[in-house]
Amino acid sequence: MSERIIVCDDEVHITRAVSMKLKKAGFDIETASDGLLGWEAIKRRPPVLLLTDYQMPRENGMNLIRRVRAEPSLKGLPIILLTAKGFEVNPVELSRQWDPIQVMCKPFSLKEVLECVQEMILTSHRAQSVSPSTSLEN
């Protein structure tokens, strides 16, 4: 089974383009047009990564991220925040508060999005495979 990613953005052309790129790379994609629909999709079946827009109707990306991080079982879910409001977002503060998270400013290249997705998922898998018994302490 391929790894599931939720792409949450109210701009259909962005959702479609990002979804196609990630599907071609072998990911299973579910889309949502706002944070409420994104949250419903996450609750149905948690993904390996959430890619969300910052500014959306009904519920924006920041509120969706707050919901995700408030859920203990989703604490380590990798998140990519897409934004056209890069000047309003402090990536360092977001990382301090909600790591693992990456901020990508619009416009972005689909190649960069795919590379970021792959790196975040790889890092997440590595973190999950490390257990206390595999620590370097002897």
Image (spheres, rainbow, N blue to C red):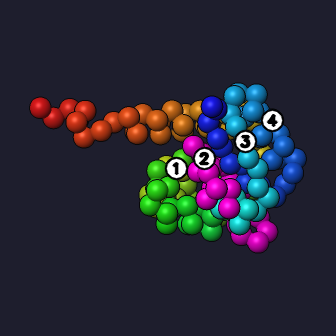
Please state which amino acid type lies under the numbered disc 4. Answer: Met
Provide the residue span drawn in magenta.
Answer: 40-60
Mark nearer the N terminus (3 vs 4): 4
* Alpha carbons under labels 4 and 2: distance apart: 17 Å
Q: Which amino acid type corresponds to the residue marked 1 in the rendered image?
A: Leu
- Nearer the N terminus, badge 1 or badge 2? 2
In front: mark 3 or mark 1? 3
Q: Please identify the residue farthest to the right as the structure is shown.
A: 13
Separation of residues labelled 2 and 3 (CA atoms): 9 Å
Please give the residue where the numbered disc 2 appears in the rendered image. Answer: 47
Element type where label 1 sits in the image:
loop
Q: Is residue 59 something that shows in the picture?
A: yes
Q: Closer to us: mark 4 or mark 2?
A: 2
With 82 as the anchor, is 15 left or right in this view?
A: right
Disc 3 or disc 4, which is closer to the eye? 3
Q: Is residue 90 above or below residue 100?
A: below
Q: Secondary structure at mark 4?
A: helix
Helix or strand or loop: what does disc 2 sit on?
loop
Q: Earlier in the sequence, mark 4 or mark 2?
A: 4
Q: Which residue is mark 1?
A: 77
Alpha carbon separation for disc pair 3 and 4: 9 Å
Q: Residues within 10 Å of mark 1 (few under 14, many from 20)?
A: many
